[in-house]
Image (tube, rainbow, N blue to C red):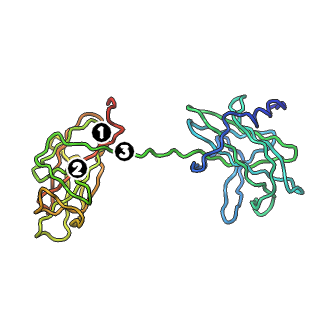
Amino acid sequence: MRKFSAILLAVCLTAGSTTLFAKPKTNYKAFSPSDNGKSVMLKSDSKQYRYFVLEKGESIGFEVKGPTRVKIRTRALLPEKASSGDYSVIVWEGEKSRGGRKVSVTASKVNIDGTGKVGVARDIFIKVPRGKHKFSVTVQSENVDKVFLRFYQEKKKKKKQTYVPFHPYEYANKVKLKSGKSSISYYIIDENGGTRLKVIGPTKIKIYCRANFDPTMKEKSKFTLGVFENGETVKKFSAVTKKSTRSLFTDLPELIPSKLHTYILEVPKGEHVYEFKKINSMPNSLAARFKIQKSSLGKKK
């Protein structure tokens, strides 16, 4: 059992530099501590939540890899004849305090199997630096012998991928497509190919593709865009499409572009030369343009 001095407790609860209050939009995911011991189900309205039991004089440990944030939700089991309680929860890393909170709480509507008064929730937020860390949690109180804990870790935010225009090193025909107020370059692709890309992976290529209708074709048509490397098929992208009512080729007024279809080509490590061909398609040709993952540019492969 740890021994606490008045000075140490004051440092833990008032001056812990790693104790943070979370930003309003931070999302968290529940996790179980490494030495969880006993747990209980606390009922709140129609939902039940699993909490881990921390008794005075004991500790609960958990491990986490940073950088990240951890939220610990605490609820006290109040004495039988009391309507409130006071307690302090402290988070330790070895013998050093990493945060804590001293609170006074009243009874909530949450209960254990319909019995037992449980205090309102109070949260502790801990900022975890880079690397693997082992923490333990303890409780101090004059009138509370048991506190229930629920652990949450900040969800990693997915980085939004940014793509920038990427042009073929070889092509047979480039045309302008007008869509609204924009005029965009596309490259014509037929069964003989006509468009090649040279790219260094790993990265991702975003392909914007349209089928080219002539006025005699039906409203809908199937097309397949094939990607080849050294004569071998790398990928096939297929769709059933129909004519666009908002776009036109200013260079080829006899052709009607289809609606836009977007695909992602995963490029493995190394240098690659891809050829694009129209295969098993009713339209006489396709039109495509390309973008590359910005984060992959300028990096050593």
Quarter of the image where the N terminus is located: top right
Compare marks 2 and 1 and give the one earlier in the sequence.
1
Compare marks 3 and 1 and give the one earlier in the sequence.
3
Determine whether the residue tagged by mark 2 lies in a helix, strand or loop.
strand
In the displayed orientation, state which residue is furthest to the front: 181
- Mark 3 neighbour density, 10 Å: few (under 14) some (14–19) many (20 or more): few
Residue 256, labelled with which disc? none
- How far, Cα to Cα, is label 3 from label 1? 18 Å
Q: Are marks 2 and 3 in contact (CB under 8 Å)?
A: no
The residue that mark 3 highlights is 162
The residue that mark 1 highlights is 268
Q: Which of the pair 174/122 is nearer the observer?
A: 174
Q: Residue, x 83% and y 53% (percent of image)?
A: 78
Where does residue 110 sit, x and y in percent of width and height? 74, 60
- How far, Cα to Cα, is label 2 from label 1? 20 Å
Question: Which quarter of the picture shows residue 5?
Answer: top right
Q: Is residue 219 left or right of residue 60?
A: left
Residue type highlighted by circle 2: Arg
Is residue 242 depicted above or below 73 in this figure?
below
Where does residue 174 sit, x and y in percent of width and height? 14, 49
Residue 289, labelled with which disc? 2
- Mark 1 neighbour density, 10 Å: few (under 14) some (14–19) many (20 or more): few
In the displayed orientation, state which residue is furthest to the right: 81
Residue type highlighted by circle 3: Thr
Where does residue 17 sit, x and y in percent of width and height? 68, 33
- How far, Cα to Cα, is label 2 from label 3? 16 Å
Determine whether the residue tagged by mark 1 lies in a helix, strand or loop.
strand
Compare marks 2 and 3 and give the one earlier in the sequence.
3
Determine whether the residue tagged by mark 3 lies in a helix, strand or loop.
loop
Quarter of the image where the C terminus is located: top left
- Count up the numbered dots: 3
Residue type highlighted by circle 1: Pro
